[in-house]
Image (cartoon, helix red, strand yellow):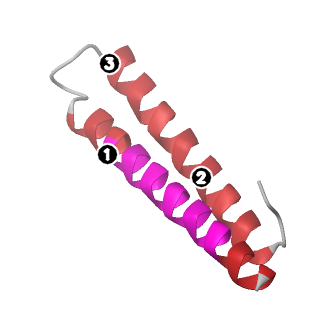
Amino acid sequence: MAIIEIMKERYLYILLFVAAFAVSAVILWGGWRMRFSVPRIVAMLLFLIGLSLAISTLYLLLYVILGDATV
């Protein structure tokens, strides 16, 4: 029974990380699309924030899926 509870918790973490990755993809796409309509530094900052969020959430997602980690 405890295994089922652990798996439920792991699926909630996976869902959370997928949602965070989707948000970072939207930020990344927005930074890329606005690169000509806003000052270049603002678009670059949005792009870098989105990229770093995407990389960190993918890393944490793999850590939760592959490792027996409870974040």
Mark with earlier residue (2, 1):
1
| Marks 3/2: CA–CA distance | 26 Å
Q: Nearer the viewer, mark 3 or mark 2?
A: 2
- Indicate the secondary structure of the residue bearing disc 2: helix
Q: Which mark is residue 54?
A: none
**In the shown orientation, is residue 50 left or right of residue 6?**
left
Magenta includes 13?
yes
In the rendered view, tell whether residue 60 sits above or below residue 66. Answer: above
Q: Nearer the viewer, mark 3 or mark 1?
A: 1
Q: Residue at x 70, y 75 (%)?
A: 5
Give the image location of residue 62, x and y in percent: 69, 68
Q: Which mark is residue 40?
A: 3
Kindly give the residue lying farthest to the left in the view shown.
Answer: 37
Kindly give the residue lying farthest to the right in the view shown.
Answer: 68
Amino acid type assigned to the residue bearing label 1 in the image: Val
The residue stretch that appears in magenta: 8-26
Q: Residue at x 41, y 34 (%)?
A: 47
Relative depth, front residue between 57 and 30: 57
Instruction: Tell me the crowding category of disc 1: few under 14, some 14 to 19, or many 20 or more residues within 10 angstroms, Cα based.
Output: some
Q: Residue at x 79, y 60 (%)?
A: 70
**In the shown orientation, is residue 20 left or right of residue 10?**
left
Which quarter of the figure has residue 9? bottom right
In the rendered view, tell whether residue 21 sits above or below residue 39. Answer: below
- Which quarter of the rendering shows the N terminus? bottom right
Check disc 1 and report the residue beneath it.
26
**In the shown orientation, is residue 21 left or right of residue 8?**
left
Q: Residue at x 72, y 66 (%)?
A: 64
Check disc 2 and report the residue beneath it.
57
In the rendered view, tell whether residue 65 sits above or below residue 57. Answer: below
